[in-house]
Image: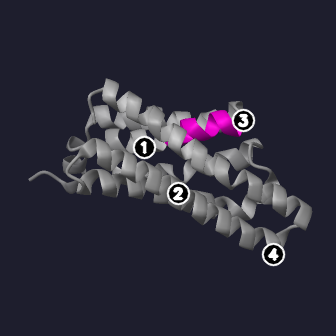
């Protein structure tokens, strides 16, 4: 009789595991080296969506937790913004969940992908912007609160959409979508 541990190990797909580690590596290392929201944001969003399609929903949701912690630790996200990190994580998860739901529930997968992408990006933007407005008023000075709100407003929407388009192009090239 095969033990549960041995059975679990044999069911691990090495190719999927390699994909996850490559994508997780990009999501982990990129914020250490690239400190530009307009470059890091789209790439991270693309990585989250690529993980969804190449590895699966669970891996994508786990990866949603990583980039904002690394961005905080690397200085891309100022230390004063530490209280909003859980909200960034949730915003990433909302984007991934929207893309997954629309893609899997609409008959036309291309339409589902883009409807999920735009809906998810809008939900992420609204969630982050409203969260930051509330939290920043409680925790930081008003001048800084305005700057924080700007970082977490429309650039979040734009970087999510750009990242989704990048992911779509990769997935099309790999014939995974």
Which SS class for mark 2?
A: helix
User: Between 76 and 175, which is closer to the camera in this rendering?
Assistant: 175
Give x and y (percent) for residue 117: 43, 49
Question: Which mark lies nearer to you, 3 or 2?
Answer: 2
Q: Which residue is mark 2?
A: 122
Q: Which residue in the protein does label 1 denote?
A: 49
N-terminal of the pair, mark 4 or mark 3, is 3
Residue 65, quarter of picture: bottom right
Question: Looking at the image, is mark 3 or mark 2 earlier in the sequence?
Answer: 3
In three-dimensional space, the C-alpha distance between marks 1 and 2, rounded to whole angstroms, equals: 15 Å
Left or right of 51? Residue 123 is right
| Occupied quadrant, residue 148 | bottom right
Mark 2 against mark 4, which lies toward the viewer?
2
**Which mark's residue is nearer the viewer, 1 or 2?**
2
* Residue nearest the observer in this picture, 77 or 120: 120
Q: CA distance from mark 1 to mark 4?
A: 33 Å
- The kind of secondary structure the magenta stretch mainly shows is helix
Q: Is residue 111 magenta?
A: no
Q: Which residues are magenta?
A: 36-45
40 within the magenta span: yes
> Between disc 1 and disc 3, whose residue precedes?
3
């Amino acid at each position: 009789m095969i033990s549960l541990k041995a059975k679990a190990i044999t069911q691990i797909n090495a190719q999927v595991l390699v994909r996850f580690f490559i994508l997780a590596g990009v999501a982990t290392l990129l914020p250490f080296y690239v400190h530009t929201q307009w470059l890091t944001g789209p790439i991270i969003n693309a990585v989250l969506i690529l993980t969804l399609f190449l590895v699966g929903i669970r891996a994508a949701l786990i990866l949603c937790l990583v980039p904002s912690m690394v961005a905080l630790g690397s200085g891309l996200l100022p230390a004063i913004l530490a209280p909003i990190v859980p909200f960034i994580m949730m915003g990433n998860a909302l984007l991934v969940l929207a893309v997954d739901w629309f893609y899997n529930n609409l008959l036309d997968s291309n339409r589902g992908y883009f409807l999920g992408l735009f809906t998810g990006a809008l939900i992420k933007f609204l969630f982050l912007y409203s969260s930051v407005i509330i939290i920043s008023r409680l925790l930081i000075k008003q001048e800084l609160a305005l700057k924080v709100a700007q970082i977490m407003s429309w650039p979040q929407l734009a970087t999510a959409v750009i990242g989704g388009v990048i992911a779509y192009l990769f997935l099309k090239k790999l014939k995974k979508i």
